[in-house]
Image: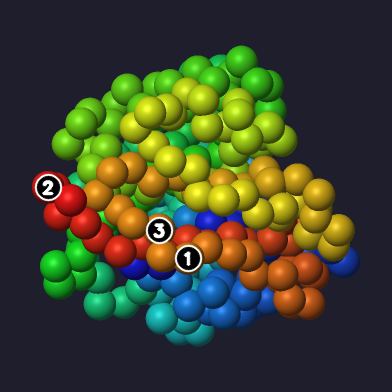
C-alpha cells in the first residue's frame, strides 16, 4: 500500500495564487492509495476547506475520509485524508494534541482485500518541546495492537531526524528522509513518514517535478509498504 503526505499550504502556490486544481493534479500524480494532507482547511471562521469536495470526487480517484466535524471543513485541525476509491474505512479517530498552539492528529483504518493499514496524519507544532509531547501522546494512544501495521505521516516541523524519531522509538521506524521544504530549493526534511511492525518498506521517494515545486511550499513525499503477518 502506498502512502503519501503533502502539506498543501491551503492550496496556495509559490506564485501566491490559490489553485485547488493544481494541488489535485499533483495528488493524482503520486499514484498513492492514501494521501495525508496538512493545511487542507483555511484558518479563519469555520475553517472552510481549500479543496472543494465536489472537485476531489469529480477530478480524482479519491474519496474524502470523513474527519471534519462540520460541513465546510475537509479535516481536523487542517489534517485531512484522501483514500483511493475501492478501499473501505474502519475506525476513525481525532486527537487533540498538547502544546501552546491548537494542534490535532487524525487516524483512519484503511482496508482493501487482505490489506489493512492504520494511517495517522499529523501536523506538529512549531516548538520542539511541544512536538515531543505531541509524538509521545500519539505513541501512547496507539497501544500494541494499534501499533501493528500503522503509519504515521505528516509535517513533523522538525529539522533533526533524531528529535523527529526519538519519541516514537522503539516501536516505529522512520522512512529515509526526503528534503521537502522549501519546494523550490528543498533543504529540510520537515515532512516525514514512520511505520510500525508488520510493515516492510518497499520504496520511498519525493515528487519534485515542476508542478510540485509550483503548487505549494512543501513537496509531497511517499512510502510504499508490504504487509507482514503478525508472526513475521
Residue 212, percent from left and from top: 71, 71
Give me the disc on residue 96: none
Q: Which residue is mark 2?
A: 231
- Of callouts 2 and 3, which one flags the residue occurring earlier in the amino acid sequence? 3
Q: Residues within 10 Å of mark 1 (few under 14, many from 20)?
A: few
- Of callouts 2 and 1, which one flags the residue occurring earlier in the amino acid sequence? 1
Give me the disc on residue 203: 1
Alpha carbons under labels 1 and 3: distance apart: 6 Å
Give the quadrant of residue 186. Answer: bottom right
Quick one: 52 or 22, which is closer to the camera? 22
Alpha carbons under labels 2 and 1: distance apart: 22 Å
Whether tag 2 and tag 3 are in contact, CB under 8 A, the answer is no
- Please report the residue visible at 20 percent of the width from the left and 70 percent of the height from the top: 112
Q: Which residue is mark 3?
A: 201
Q: In terms of secondary structure, where does tag 3 sit?
A: strand
Residue 11, percent from left and from top: 68, 62
Q: Could one spot residue 73 in this view of the protein?
A: no
Amino acid at each position: 500500500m502506498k502512502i503519501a503526505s503533502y502539506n498543501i499550504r491551503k492550496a496556495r502556490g509559490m506564485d501566491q495564487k490559490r489553485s485547488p486544481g493544481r494541488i489535485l493534479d499533483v495528488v493524482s500524480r503520486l499514484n498513492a492509495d492514501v494521501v495525508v494532507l496538512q493545511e487542507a482547511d483555511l484558518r479563519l471562521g469555520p475553517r472552510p476547506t481549500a479543496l472543494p469536495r465536489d472537485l476531489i470526487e469529480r477530478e480524482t480517484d479519491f474519496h474524502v475520509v470523513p474527519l471534519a466535524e462540520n460541513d465546510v471543513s475537509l479535516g481536523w485541525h487542517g489534517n485531512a485524508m484522501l483514500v483511493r476509491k475501492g478501499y473501505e474505512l474502519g475506525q476513525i479517530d481525532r486527537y487533540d494534541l498538547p502544546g501552546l498552539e491548537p494542534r490535532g492528529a487524525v487516524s483512519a483504518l484503511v482496508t482493501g482485500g487482505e490489506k489493512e493499514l492504520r494511517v495517522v496524519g499529523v501536523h506538529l507544532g512549531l516548538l520542539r518541546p511541544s512536538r515531543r509531547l505531541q509524538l509521545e501522546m500519539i505513541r501512547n494512544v496507539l497501544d500494541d495492537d494499534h501499533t501493528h501495521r500503522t503509519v504515521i505521516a505528516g509535517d513533523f516541523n522538525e529539522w533533526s531526524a533524531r528529535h523527529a524519531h526519538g519519541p516514537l522509538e522503539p516501536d516505529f521506524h522512520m522512512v529515509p528522509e526526503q528534503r521537502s521544504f522549501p519546494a523550490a530549493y528543498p533543504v529540510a526534511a520537515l515532512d516525514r513518514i514512520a511505520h510500525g511492525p508488520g510493515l516492510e518498506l518497499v520504496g520511498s521517494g519525493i515528487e519534485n517535478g515542476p508542478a510540485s515545486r509550483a503548487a505549494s511550499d512543501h513537496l509531497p513525499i511517499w512510502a510504499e509498504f508490504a504487509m507482514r503477518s503478525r508472526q513475521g
